[in-house]
Image (cartoon, grey):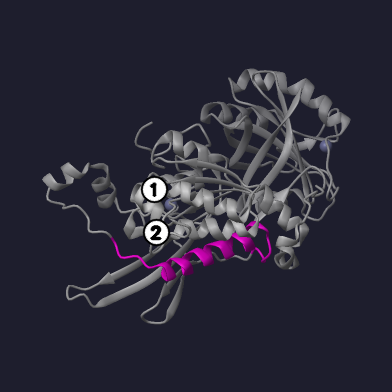
Amino acid sequence: MINKCRLRISREHFDILTRHLFPGDSDEHGAVLLAGISSSAGQPTLHVRELHLAKEGSDYVEGKIGYRALTPTFIHRLITRARDERLAYLAVHNHSSDREVAFSRIDLESHSRGYPALLQISRGMPVGALVFGLRSIQADVWLPSGGRLSLDEASVVGNTIQRLTPSPVRSFLRTAETHDRQLRMFGADGQAELAKCRVGIIGLGGIGSLLAEYLARLGVGKFCLVDSDRVEQSNLSRIVGASPADATSGATKVAVSHRLILQANANAQIQIITDDVAKESVAKTLTSCDYLFLAADSMRARLVVNALIHQYLIPGVQLGSKIRPDSTGALIEVMSANRPIRPGRGCLLCNQLIDPTQLAKEAKTDAERKAQAYGVEEPNPSVISLNAVSAAHAVNDFLLDYLSLRPEGNQLYYGHFHFLKRTRSQVEPRKDQECPECSHRGLRYGRGDAVELPCIEG
Ligand SMILES: [Zn+2]
Ligand SMILES: [Zn+2]
């Protein structure tokens, strides 16, 4: 039986690979990808961690049976590396087709001859092949258990998200009149992509509830909502959809957003988790999301979501707003932030947005904090209209990037809106080449389920 897998690859790796496969000579070229693996709701996903281009004439030569082939030396070096690093081994070549691609009979025969032996060397790691057309990809992945996987969909995750399949996918979404005005911007295919998309929203307070409202009305079909808090009287000024009765009964914030989403889209599939994202079991449910919105304000949530983005190659964004008075109460800063995070583009840690002191403080209980004279934090000021700026920009980025409605471009910016000064700054994120959380050589990048998330328990 052949099942399907997904593939995630960064834009950076994809561009290097496709330039190598399609240099304009209409010939066939080769490479090997090493990929982390994850499994969520029964669907395996491969996350490309390493790219090894096969040099013409020395690593990729005339084949004895097929047209061209990787040399045994090149294969051996990389299958043993795959085994040692606990990564899947994927041999890549290209055909000259465009939107549709499939393995040839000769390709498949060579897999049958070669892969049983490679599976013995790889000691429990999958091995297989990818074939690239100009705008299409197919996979034939052999599992140690004896199963085989073809490709459902590959996502190229850069500033924008490009989707590639073995052949063109027709969307069968019945477009409702509800979305008529926005269809004129996204097209029926874009609307179908939104209906299939599963977004994770971490934190359903002031910013998260706005995200839920915007995304549901746009027609996003699947949600995973994570927040352990209940609605209080003081939240009513900014949680969209919350009523005084919710505060009185102590309704959970996820329940309020659940209700809000269904009002806009009765068919939405919503998973609600009334728990802390810092728990491993909770963080793991987010690995099947296509996009992550981080609207919780703890350092631990930042650490965990930052890890998810780089370990599983999922695009995401961190949102927040900040109001800072001086000692006399005069405002010195009123700002909203929208920080898109993409694999290969630096992370919250290399941009000093994860404060180790604060992280340590959060690990202590309230009683411990008091004992050590940290004091229990005063609640931060928060205002709905500041939250709305941050949420609206994050949702605009999601639409334009996820549906590839703007050019890929080279720059990724954090947007900081300073309201007292009436200015907006665009900050290019730093990328620390040695960052343990996001660099290609770091412990986490693309490793999927093989390494632990920086969680606390459970
Ligand atoms: Zn072929
Ligand atoms: Zn980093």
10 Å neighbourhood of mark 1: few (<14), some, or many (≥20)? Answer: many
Give the residue type at disc 2. Answer: Asn
Tag shown at residue 265? none
Image coords of residue 110 (percent x, y): 80, 26
| CB of mark 2 near ligand 2 (< 8 Å) | yes
Dominant secondary structure, magenta = helix
Residue 371 quadrant: top left
- Closest to the camera, between mark 1 and mark 2, is 1
**Picture coordinates of residue 20 (x, y %)?**
72, 50
Judging from the image, what secondary structure is the residue with disc 1 in?
helix
Residue 392: in sight, yes or no? yes
Which numbered tag is attached to residue 351? 2
View extreme (bottom): residue: 422
Secondary structure at numbered mark 2: loop
Label 1 – label 2 distance at C-alpha: 16 Å
Q: Is residue 97 left or right of residue 274?
A: right
> As rendered, which of 335 and 329 lies closer to the eye?
329
State whether residue 72 is above or below residue 326. Answer: above
Decide which of 428, 181 is in the foreground and name it.
181
The quarter of the rendered structure image containing the N terminus is: top right
Q: Is residue 397 magenta?
A: yes
| Quarter assignment of residue 143 | top right
316 or 321, nearer to the observer: 321
Picture coordinates of residue 338 (x, y %)?
Answer: 47, 64
- Which residue appears farthest toward the right when viewing the image? 105
Quadrant in which the C terminus is drawn: top left
What type is the residue that disc 1 sits on?
Ala
Q: Which residue is mark 1?
A: 301
Disc on the earlier residue, 1 or 2: 1
- Which stretch appears magenta? 380-408
Determine if the magenta segment contains residue 19.
Answer: no
